[in-house]
Image (cartoon, rainbow, N blue to C red):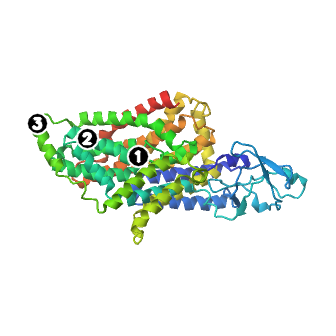
Amino acid sequence: MNNGLLAAGGHSVSPTVTILFGAILVGLIACLALEEKLHAKKSLIAGVFAIVCLLLGAVCGVLPFHQIVVGSTGQLVEHDDVHGRILDDKDGDVEEVHLAPVAPATNADAGDNNTGDSGQSEPEHAEPAQTPDHAHRPLHVDGHRLNMPVYIPGIDWGVIIIILGSSLFVDVTSKSGLFTWIAVKVTKASRGDPLMLLVSYGLMTVVFSAVLNNVTAMIIVGSLTVVSLEKLNRRDKLLGFLLIEGLLTNIGGLLTLISSVPNIIVGTAAGISFVEFFLKSSPYVAVATAVTLFMGAKLFGIQRLTSAEDREAANELVSAFDENDGVESWGFFRFSSIMLALFVITIATTSVLPLGIRHLGMGFVAMSFAGVMLIRFKSEVDRFYSAVDWDLLGFFMALFVVIYAMEHALVLDAIGAGVNRVLVDVQKTPSDWRDATTLLFGAAVFSSVTDNIPLAAMLANILKSLGASGESGLWWSVIFGANLGGNLTPIGSASTLVAVTIMHKHKLPMSFAGFVKAAFVFAVVQIVLASVYVLLFLR
């Protein structure tokens, strides 16, 4: 989503319309916060608001109903003669581009359109070429115009495809028994010692949350925790284990660019590569994980076994676990292991791979790996399609449409102006410490009571429209705040909600207030550590 187009096109909207759309945005956030009370899926909630935004956008005349340009190989360029040559520096190297004669545009062709990844748009002031002045208007090299529903360019399809491809790949890979095999191996390595088990499961939670999605990580680790502690006769420690694991899913979600959706949204907007993201986030993740495990062990009384008899008894119990139970085909198991390693490596190096793959992006990589894995189940792939979280994907698409409408109604400009008055200078590098702290704590508080995805998308758009540089620490303030805020309440993230669900399933007392009381000190320490880290190392 490109906010700069609105200003460039001289876009103007009545303040009343902006206020109306702003009220709709507040309503969306409130409904998402009350999702459980409304007994409605978030995709339906966002979908209804998207329909309302599109209808009002059409009635109020704020949406751009024009043709858009797709397939262009370059940026908008100025030329002196439509039959002559121009200079194109889209790749940083000046090169000659020869233009074929171009037919005059029609009034319907001009307009202010969202560019996204799918195409580029002509500025509103572009008029039909009837005179020699046409020789000086911008052209798209090799592009062509087509009609498209106004809401399609508003959806960030790159994000949608990454989520879909990664989900399919992980789901198929899990059928090999690889993740369960790793989990049981880790359990055996702890030899049944409670503290070592906590550390092992904690580290496994962080790694799984970075490679898988947070919900899948919590389900895998949480289920194994219940089985392990019951066999070890340590059920009294189950509540502490599950709570700590739930909190660690959001810390592990900070480890890579694709670990969580806010990372994808904000990282993409800031132009942060996979490798850069990992190098900058991993030190914090390591420290926060160690601090969380230390605090959890102290607060829940999880200690090492002291007597030789207790250690021997615990070791015998975990030795009975069989990591091979979940492996149906060793050939598929080995193939999945190789593909998982290749998947992580390819995603990490997408930005430096040959030109074709680099331009196709991470979404292409994720879908390609998913396609290869699905070949193993070629006659029953529909069961994997049905297991995809379509509610999440539908929510994203509807959310992007809402934000697109808000963008054209200048709601984001209004919010950005308000944020700009609070922030000192978003274009300054390094960013002001007050700006970084304000954004981080604000993002954390808001993401604790509502979905962190719309919050991250909105703040990313605002920072982009305000001209924050890719090196600014403000992007990292949003990333840390949006992820860690999920640890303040059980509804702050899907993985903590899963943790509470597992607690209730096994008759462990944990109310909303009880979770906040138990998790609050962890979340505050994690957020304070994040603010210090951003100010000292990422600003």
Which of the marked residues, 1 or 3, is nearer the chain's N terminus?
Answer: 1
Mark 3–mark 2 distance (CA, rounded to whole Å): 20 Å
Q: What residue type is labelled 1?
A: Ala
Q: Which of marks 3 and 2 is in front?
A: 3
Q: How many labels does the image show?
A: 3
* 468 shown above or below 499: above
Q: What residue type is labelled 3?
A: Ala
Element type where label 2 sits in the image: helix
Residue holding disc 3: 308
Q: Position of residue 99 (x, y in %)?
A: 80, 55
Q: Which of marks 1 and 3 is in front?
A: 3
Q: Let me know if residue 503 appears in the view.
A: no
| Residue 198 circle label | 2
Q: Residues within 10 Å of mark 3 (few under 14, many from 20)?
A: few
Q: Residues within 10 Å of mark 1 (few under 14, many from 20)?
A: many
Residue nearest the observer in this picture, 126 or 381: 381
- Name the quadrant containing residue 118: bottom right
Q: Let me know if residue 198 appears in the view.
A: yes
Determine whether, in the image, residue 280 is placed left or right of residue 420: left
Q: Residue at x 62, y 54 (%)?
A: 117
Mark 1–mark 2 distance (CA, rounded to whole Å): 18 Å
Residue holding disc 1: 210
Element type where label 1 sits in the image: helix
